[in-house]
Amino acid sequence: MSLDDVEAAIRAADPDAKVGRSTIYRWRRAEITNPQRKQVQAFCDGLGIPRTLASQILGWDDAPLSAEPDPTIDPDLRAVARLLMDPAVAAEEKTVIRATLRHLAQRR
């Protein structure tokens, strides 16, 4: 999406939120440490991002607590699953992890 598309989506979600190009740039540069809730909600609504996700990231009190991990799943497997879902992990590393898991699964 272009910045114009983002602005239009936010305006469509809440015309009164006043989230403009300069606000988005300041958020991106982390110049605003305590963003206005109404602006963040309009941003989330316009881009289809769950409001609860922004609330959790920003540490707002009304954010629901994250669910406890399933105790029946091994913690190592949860860690591997997090790596495979993390967009910051390189595709090559994910390929190696998957190949290793396939190899281990075929050993039995």
Image (cartoon, rainbow, N blue to C red):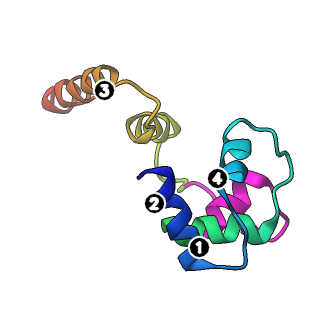
Q: CA distance from mark 2 to mark 4?
A: 11 Å
Q: Residue at x 30, y 25 (%)?
A: 97
Q: Residue at x 45, y 60 (%)?
A: 5
Q: Residue at x 45, y 38 (%)?
A: 86
Name the residue type under label 1: Arg
Q: Residue at x 67, y 43 (%)?
A: 25
Name the residue type under label 3: Ala
- Disc nearer the start of the sequence (1/4): 1
Q: Is residue 4 above or below residue 73?
A: below
Name the residue type under label 2: Asp
Mark 2 touches mark 4? (CB < 8 Å) = no
**Residue identified by numbered label 4:** 21
**Residue identified by numbered label 3:** 91
- Disc nearer the start of the sequence (4/3): 4
Mark 2 touches mark 1? (CB < 8 Å) = no
Q: Is residue 43 above or below residue 22?
A: below
Q: Observer-nearest residue: 46 or 51?
A: 46
Q: Quadrant of residue 28?
A: top right
Estimate the x, y position of residue 6 in percent, counting from the top left: 51, 59
Is 90 covered by the magenta stretch?
no
Q: CA distance from mark 2 to mark 3?
A: 28 Å
Estimate the x, y position of residue 44 in percent, counting from the top left: 59, 66
Q: Residues within 10 Å of mark 3 (few under 14, many from 20)?
A: few
The part of the chain drawn in magenta is 51-69
Mark 3 touches mark 1? (CB < 8 Å) = no
